[in-house]
Image: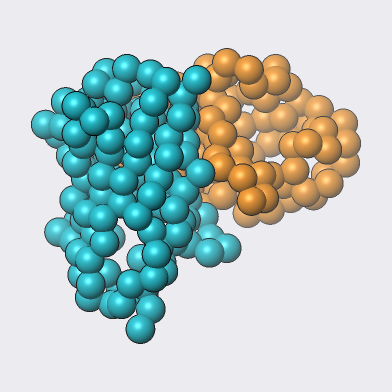
Chain colours: A orange, B cyan
Amino acid sequence: DIQMTQSPSSLSASVGDRVTITCRARQGIGKYLAWYQQKPGKVPKLLIFAASTLQSGVPSRFSGSGSETDFTLTISSLQPEDVATYYCQKYDSAPQGFTFGPGTKVDI
Amino acid sequence: QVQLVESGGGVVQPGRSLRLSCAASGFTFTTYGMDWVRQAPGKGLEWVAVISYDGNNKYYADSVKGRFTISRDNSKNTLYLHMNSLRAEDTAVYFCAKGLDTYGPGDYWGQGTLVTVSS
């Protein structure tokens, strides 16, 4: 399986802050990258797919960018309800695995 | 609305087998790939396996390859995960997820079923 890395592993920010999370793939994956939000005790929720396409119903303060090996999830103005762990996932090649990153925990 | 309901979890001894099921409704099951994803207690998400819409293509994480089998019954709108030779490190909540497309990220997830491997 191709490994994914995320940084930072955790962060604490204030309401209204701009928050950026990075995800890196060991080899190029085009734009086959998704971002999920998982709140404590809840099921993961798809936020972004194809690196930058916002899933229906997701607030516009969330955005994604990047391609190949370097990707970014940005929350433009952090809200209290954004406290969660965020995961990236590659899905470029099923035989190589749809690996998740280790997660980034966001607190306020 | 899309619903995914997992079942079949429980406590099982190391080396034994277990079969998980995921009953799907609210969408055309035969059109989408389906995944199993697990989460060990207090840990991150781990992708386990994916199956194509028609069941002809199946892929697995290295950690379960040769021990787990993903399958589907499109006549019953049900996804399965057959788990053999279970180990303590397989202890986790197992989620099924509907793929966004033939393959792809999960846009709908079930609530999960807990599998505990312990003697």
Look at 39% across and 26% down and name the residue there.
Answer: B25
Nearer to the camera, B99 or A23: B99
Q: Is residue A24 above or below residue A29?
A: below
Which residue is outermost to the left?
B56
Give the farthest residue toward the right. Answer: A15
Name the spot of residue A67 as percent of width and height, x first.
45, 26
Residue A26 x, y percent position in the rendering: 38, 45
The quadrant in which residue A19 appears is top right
Q: Is residue A65 visible?
A: no
Image-based side of A11 in relation to A63, left or right: right
Residue drawn at x 27%, y 69% is B86
Question: Which residue does the image show at 19% across and 41% down from the upper left?
Answer: B71
- Residue A56 visible in the shown view: yes
Please tell me in which quadrant of the rendered image residue A61 appears. top right
Give residue A108's position: percent from left, percent from top.
83, 46
In the picture, measured across the screen, residue B66 lies left or right of residue B105, that is left
